[in-house]
């Protein structure tokens, strides 16, 4: 058992420790040396305490977490940073339990230290990915700015360069202030409107003139919101700045140019409708973003995308296509509208947008370049590649309900914005799913890891208890695995473990759970089964394993046998620890009895 315990400890992806109230610790293996740089003996000799490594800014919270655990319950989880011997920063996740003496006082702490530095780095990358959503701002038909009382502004895109002639950097560095551009005659009125808004509901609209770098006078329309702190002090102003020079020029000449008045009004009406439509589209894009941020899986995201596309393109049809894992084709994952796409699966060379890496619409179609995945009679469509972080992940296809060229241009522009948004959103969700999979899956076998087993077995036992049902637990061990490794090498051992992962997945029901317990040992949790059925399942696994052939290198590895231990809840234990120990003991008896057999807990 001691050897088994040592194998388990060595394969834990964490440091098992025993700590004391003075900050010193005892360790059960040397994994602590890999991320602290200090020898195991330096801790156990008490020359070095664990608390000596904790960053000063984390130490107070570290202590508070422990105090809260003493008050609220003996188990606790906390995260903090330590400085290793080389001066690097390491993020630690601690899962511990306070052990008390007979008088109820804390005697020592036992727990696990996990190195989560890589997890924290991935979380930071995820936050950076979310910032890229700001590209949607580029499509707003106005300059979005954040201003301050001294007249300085921060800008969010480069449209301000077209409006003023000055570079974005000159404003963002505050070398150039927005108020410097306002025509002198308009400054008092602009200031008056701001002061009135400050006294009222903190929102305002004002129009004034600015001077372009080349000397031209530009009329602008500003819509702003004054943001104050709880004490009522102005922090900043957030708003939109529209170029209304054309409208102002028309208004100035309306008395003389009655003939042009109708045209001017029509232009303003068209502009107003386009602006209204853009506002609606921006609002819908925002709603789609909220939905996607609430999704936990790609499948949920496809449902949200379908709903949003029906609102953004109410008179059109289309589909969102995503590359399959081998990237040999794109498959329709979200379809909306009355007209179904001609093809639900499309090869990359059948779509000009995927071939060229750019939107494909009316101009290209009229030139004779038609996508092969679209009905040859249909020329009113748009294809836009979905790109995230420089890589194509799919294609967005819209079948237009109207062949109007003007509408086609507007729809193509909208499709481009939607594609940029969806590409980033789906990339973010895939990263989230990757993080989730890494946290609960064993990377070698693809089965759930021990951490997931510990989280789910408690849930399964409580569910079975409420429903009055049984849960079967099977411990599986590959016989003579060490000899196998020594004979064929660790690469062959890894190949065998990978094949065992696939083997177990093939031989369990959809609602059963297969986990890698550690090393060559696996655990199966079977829901709603009888003792006889569980033993029968274990025997079938043992027999099927004898026929298993693992291809490695130029040939097949020698056959294997399995030893299996079976325990039942609640008959053999009523807690996760008890039931796992019962199954493990049954496995031990199976090995002692000669291996290649199944033993049931509680029997001779």
Image: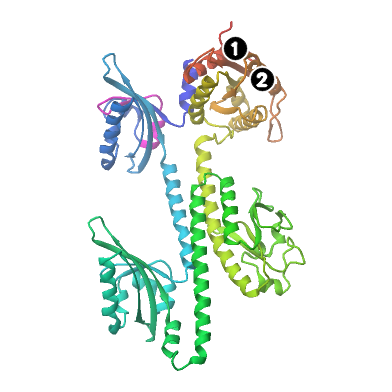
Secondary structure found at label 2: helix
Provide residue 119's location: percent of width, then percent of height.
44, 42
Q: Which residues are magenta?
A: 18-36
- Label number found at residue 12: none
Secondary structure found at label 1: strand
In the rendered image, the residue lying farthest to the top is 604
Provide the residue designation for mark 2. Answer: 537
Residue 509 left/right relative to 577: right
Residue 97 left/right relative to 318: left
Does 158 appear above or below 398? below
Image quarter for residue 104? top left
Provide residue 544's location: percent of width, then percent of height.
70, 23
What colouring method underlies this structural image?
rainbow
- Label number found at residue 600: 1
The residue lying at 49 percent from left, 28 percent from top is 11
State yes or no: residue 30 in magenta. yes
């Amino acid at each position: 058992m001691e050897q088994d315990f040592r194998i388990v400890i060595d394969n834990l992806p964490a440091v098992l420790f025993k700590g004391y109230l003075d900050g010193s610790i005892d360790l059960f293996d040397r994994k602590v040396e890999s991320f602290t740089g200090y020898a195991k003996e330096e801790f156990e000799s008490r020359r070095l305490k664990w608390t000596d490594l904790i960053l000063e800014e984390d130490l107070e919270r570290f202590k508070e977490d422990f105090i809260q655990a003493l008050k609220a319950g003996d188990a606790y989880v906390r995260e903090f940073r330590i400085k290793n011997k080389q001066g690097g920063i390491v993020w630690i996740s601690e899962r511990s339990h306070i052990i008390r003496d007979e008088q109820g006082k804390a005697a020592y702490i036992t727990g696990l230290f996990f190195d989560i530095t890589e997890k924290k780095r991935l979380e930071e990358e995820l936050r950076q990915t979310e910032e890229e959503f700001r590209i949607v701002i580029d499509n707003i038909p106005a300059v979005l700015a954040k201003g301050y009382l001294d007249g300085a502004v921060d800008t969010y895109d480069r449209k301000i360069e077209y409006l003023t002639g000055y570079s974005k950097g000159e404003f963002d560095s505050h070398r150039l202030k927005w108020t410097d551009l306002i025509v002198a005659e308009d400054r008092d009125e602009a200031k008056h409107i701001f002061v009135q808004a400050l006294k009222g509901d903190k929102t305002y609209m004002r129009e004034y003139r600015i001077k372009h770098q080349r000397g031209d006078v530009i009329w602008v329309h500003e819509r702003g919101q004054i943001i104050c702190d709880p004490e009522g002090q102005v922090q900043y102003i957030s708003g939109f700045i529209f170029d209304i020079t054309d409208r102002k020029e028309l208004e100035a000449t309306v008395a003389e140019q009655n003939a042009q008045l109708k045209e001017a009004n029509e232009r303003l009406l068209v502009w107003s409708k386009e602006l209204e439509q853009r506002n609606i589209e921006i609002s819908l894009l925002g709603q789609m973003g909220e939905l996607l941020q609430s999704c936990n899986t790609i499948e949920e995201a496809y449902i949200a995308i379908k709903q949003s596309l029906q609102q953004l393109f109410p008179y059109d049809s289309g589909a969102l296509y995503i590359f399959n894992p081998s990237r040999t084709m794109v498959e329709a994952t979200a379809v909306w509208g009355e007209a179904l796409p001609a093809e639900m699966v499309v090869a990359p060379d059948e779509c000009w947008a995927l071939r060229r890496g750019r939107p494909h619409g009316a101009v290209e179609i009229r030139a004779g370049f038609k996508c092969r995945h679209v009905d040859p009679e249909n020329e009113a469509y748009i294809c836009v590649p979905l790109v995230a972080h420089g890589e194509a992940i799919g294609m967005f296809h819209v079948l237009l309900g109207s062949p109007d060229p003007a509408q086609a241009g507007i729809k193509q522009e909208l499709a481009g914005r939607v594609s940029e948004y969806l590409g980033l959103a789906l990339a973010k969700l895939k990263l989230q799913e990757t993080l989730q999979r890494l946290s609960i899956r064993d990377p070698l076998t693809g089965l759930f890891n021990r951490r997931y087993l510990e989280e789910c077995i408690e849930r399964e036992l409580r569910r079975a208890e409420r429903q009055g049902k049984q849960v079967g637990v099977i411990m599986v061990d590959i016989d003579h695995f060490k000899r196998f490794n020594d004979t064929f090498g660790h690469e062959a051992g890894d190949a065998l473990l990978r094949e065992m992962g696939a083997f177990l997945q093939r031989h369990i029901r959809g609602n059963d759970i297969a986990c890698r317990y550690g090393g060559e040992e696996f655990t199966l949790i079977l829901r709603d089964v009888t003792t006889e059925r569980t033993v029968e399942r274990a025997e079938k696994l043992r027999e099927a394993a004898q026929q298993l052939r693992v291809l490695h290198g130029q040939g097949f590895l020698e056959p294997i046998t399995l030893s299996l231990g079976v325990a039942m809840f609640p008959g053999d234990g009523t807690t996760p620890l008890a039931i796992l120990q019962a199954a493990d003991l049954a496995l031990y008896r199976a090995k002692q009895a000669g291996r290649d057999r199944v033993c049931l807990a509680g029997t001779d």
